[in-house]
Image (tube, rainbow, N blue to C red):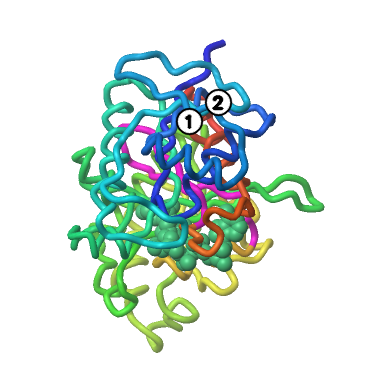
Amino acid sequence: MTLPVLALTTGEPAGIGPDLALMVAASKMPLPGRVVAVGDPDMLIERAARLKLGIDILVLESGQDVPEARPGVLPVWPVALRAPALPGRLDPSNAGYVLATLDRAIEACRRGEAGAMVTAPLHKGVIIEGGHASFTGHTEYLRDACSVDDVVMMLATRLDTPAGVQHLRVALATTHLPLREVADAITGQGLTRVLRILATDLERHFGIVEPRIAVCGLNPHAGEGGHLGREELEVIAPVLERLRSGGMHLDGPLPADTLFTPRHLDGVDAVLAMYHDQGLPVLKYAGFGRAANITLGLPIVRTSVDHGTALDLAGTATADTGSLRVALEVAAEMATGRGTGR
Ligand SMILES: NC(=O)c1ccc[n+]([C@@H]2O[C@H](COP(=O)([O-])OP(=O)(O)OC[C@H]3O[C@@H](n4cnc5c(N)ncnc54)[C@H](O)[C@@H]3O)[C@@H](O)[C@H]2O)c1
Ligand SMILES: N[C@H](C(=O)O)[C@H](O)COP(=O)(O)O
């Protein structure tokens, strides 16, 4: 069976993205797809030397087939750096380069040249400092590039527990915005769209028919009956009520502090958190290095790692490749429509 082509964007060149791409290509552990890195070939050659990895960088021409993965070989779709890159040293001049790697991978997915894109971490701050003031992350960049109205960020991990394998999936109602703006960003229309995308894609990509979704409240103790905030009463509960009457299986709004306990998570397919640091610390506490970030609602498949650029580790060969491997596996499963329990 021919494995899907997975376009791996190498992310911020001063971070660990290039290292991770080289490390998985050097490893004898099999890859779930025909991985092609998207980045600057000379930077990758230089980084491989720094990491003391013997790797052949195979630059592919446009239209050339991506070969089956072989340990020690990294096929590359070339994108040229705008300025030399040093591990650990951010340079806003390379913001356009990082975005160009995304554009190359998006285009490949849209044309069917790749079955999925997997993104190594980029640095949001340096992209903004490089002149892209409205940039907030891959998720929204992909939404705009694919011309869809809404997308949903979901991180997923598989946990080995005494009771067997369990899945923890955490999706977000809002993503990268200041905490001060979160409450105003949670609207009835927005929440409805997020829940519909989440339910649809849990079925489309993960084979979960009629998924059960547990929804967090926004305020402590889900608002304590309106005494600690009214968003639950005025926005969240009415949306859940309406969607339940349309057949969706939704619990909540529930107090977030106890929702993430085994008893409450039992039988739940995904949790919808209201904001980034309500949901992701729990997921990362349980599964950092073994989770993938998946963008739902896109016409293409995109997964990513569960960590950032780790500038402190770039060029040291000590970064953990675990999450990249999970992101590649999930992407391959989604690209081939095999569904995944992840
Ligand atoms: N998918 C993405 O593109 C993505 C995801 C998260 C954060 N980021 C960005 O990364 C930048 C840095 O973010 P941060 O400092 O909050 O988080 P980070 O994940 O880069 O680093 C947090 C800590 O985790 C460690 N760490 C991260 N990845 C590791 C790995 N693979 N192996 C071993 N240790 C690892 C780091 O050394 C550091 O101590 C920010 O600009 C952020 O926006 C990007
Ligand atoms: N919120 C993600 C995380 O903490 O792992 C991360 O910043 C990546 O976001 P994008 O996929 O939108 O770049």
Asked whether mark 1 and ligand 2 are closer than 8 Å, the reply comes as no
302 within the magenta span: yes
Q: Is residue 86 above or below residue 120?
A: below
Q: Position of residue 164 (x, y in %)?
A: 77, 46
Q: Is residue 236 left or right of residue 325?
A: left
Q: Position of residue 282 (x, y in %)?
A: 57, 65
Q: Depth check: give the residue in front, 265 or 180.
A: 180
104 within the magenta span: no
* Sequence-first disc among 2 and 1: 2
Is disc 2 in contact with disc 1, using a CB cutoff of under 8 Å? no
Q: Which mark is residue 73?
A: 2
Asked whether mark 2 and ligand 1 are closer than 8 Å, the reply comes as no
Label 1 sits on residue: 334
Q: Quadrant of the N terminus?
A: top right
User: Which residue is located at x 36 percent, y 66 percent?
Assistant: 237
**For the residue marked with disc 2, what is the amino acid?**
Val
**For the residue marked with disc 1, what is the amino acid?**
Met
Q: Position of residue 15 (x, y in %)?
A: 46, 55
Q: Quadrant of the C terminus?
A: top right
- Magenta stretch bounds: 286-307
Q: Residues within 10 Å of mark 1 (few under 14, many from 20)?
A: many
